Image (spheres, rainbow, N blue to C red):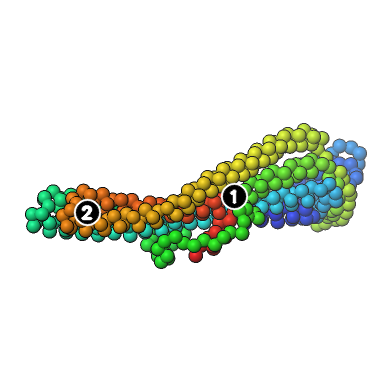
Amino acid sequence: MGSAEAAVREAKNSYLPRVNVVEEVSVGSANDVAGPFLPAPGVLHSISGSINGSQSYQAVTGNLASVYGEYDLVNFGLRGARVAGARAIAGEARADLERERYLIRWQVARVYFGILRNRYQLEVDSADIRRYQAMYTVSRALTGNGVNPGVDSSLAKAGLSRTRINYNQAMGNLRRLCQQLAYLTGLTDPGIRMDTSSGGRLRVAALSGDTAAVNVLTEYFVRRELRYGAEQELARKSYLPKVVAGAGGWARGSGDGLGYQRLNYLAGVGVVYDLFSGVHRRDRLAVLNGQIEAAGLELQQQRLSLQNQGSQADESIRVASRNLDELPVQLQAAADAYQQKLAQYKAGIVNLVELSNASFELLQAQTGYIEALNDWYTASLDKAALTGNLDQFLKSIK
């Protein structure tokens, strides 16, 4: 980002007058005809005129000091095009940075909801462990009294072990998510404390609209297309003629001494144009036209992709909402069924298999509620992020 801003300053400052100060001591021939000239790159002329009309290659010692300045009087909009191009590059870099920050916030939010899901799952698994612990205790008592066969206590013990394994897996998933959140946020403590006091479905305030004023997920591609357009305009201006004003002065010493014996000054205006500018401009514009077309297609593809993902998120929200309306009924029914089966098992009316099935149904209902809740949060988060409303969504969660 800093380099892009520096490029803007460079473009602005590139049109300051050029002033060169030179001091030299030389030895060579002074074989030239009289007449002043402006310095030309790669060409070195003698400053003095010939003393006589004959050729002379005798070495002469001399020294020279000069100052020369140059400024583009007319560049046909090249300066403005170059500054605009630098600003377009800076705008693209800024949009890319904002997009990366946005994606990280989105990822952090998804990890956060994943942590919530796994913490709720730990509570469910803990309850499942307590149920099987109770079943194991009752089955041992009934087996010891000869009411139930010994296989019941073995089955209950196996079920208890399975629930503990599930709990360990959920705990491992939670720790991995906490470590991922620590990596994304830069916090060194993987055991990040989070507010999960709601214990259920959080409240989300209504968003003001489905579409943000500026969607950072598409703004980068918009800025890229604008940058290529600015480069195209710069290419058109770069190959136009330039009107240059130059002025300079110099002091010259020659002969036995090295002191300055002659002073000269010169000023002039020149026109600079590359005869092959048309060829170079055509080639450069051909490249940029292809880049502009590709950038436009990327922008179109990004918008279509976001629209498609948004439609999928809408459907996920609808399904999760319907499930969240229905699951409490299933949850309550499963809890009641388990309590009835537990009482019947203690009375010796049903066997352990029926009680285990009731406990499993309760576990499935509890886990299903957590999954539906997580689906609703994640889909709502994705919908908000895809439409550029991520920050608004996060602020709306209560």
Q: Quadrant of residue 123?
A: bottom left
Q: Callout 1 environment at 10 Å: few (<14), some (14 to 19), or many (20+)?
A: many
Image mark count: 2
The residue lying at 39 percent from left, 55 percent from top is 329
The residue lying at 83 percent from left, 50 percent from top is 72
Can you give x and y, in whole percent of width and height, for residue 376 in the image? 47, 53
Q: Quadrant of residue 19?
A: bottom right
Quick check: 333 left or right of 269? left
Q: Quadrant of residue 334?
A: bottom left
**Mark 2 element type:** helix
In the rendered image, which residue does mark 1 sit on? 217
**Mark 1 element type:** helix
Between 286 and 35, the one lying in front of the other is 286
Quick check: 149 left or right of 302? left
Between 189 and 257, the one lying in front of the other is 189
Can you give x and y, in whole percent of width and height, for residue 214 in the image? 64, 54
**Residue 305 in view, yes or no:** yes
Can you give x and y, in whole percent of width and height, for residue 36 in the image? 89, 47
Between 43 and 118, the one lying in front of the other is 118
Can you give x and y, in whole percent of width and height, for residue 225 in the image? 68, 44
Asked if residue 112 is positioned above or below residue 48 in the image, the reply reads below
Instruction: Give the distance between the C-alpha atoms of the residues marked 2 and 1, in whole angstroms.
Output: 48 Å
Q: Callout 2 environment at 10 Å: few (<14), some (14 to 19), or many (20+)?
A: many
Q: Residue furthest front?
A: 349
Amino acid bearing label 1: Leu
In the rendered image, which residue does mark 2 sit on? 160
Q: Earlier in the sequence, mark 2 or mark 1?
A: 2
The residue lying at 38 percent from left, 60 percent from top is 190
**Residue 170 in view, yes or no:** no
The residue lying at 23 percent from left, 49 percent from top is 354
Amino acid bearing label 2: Leu
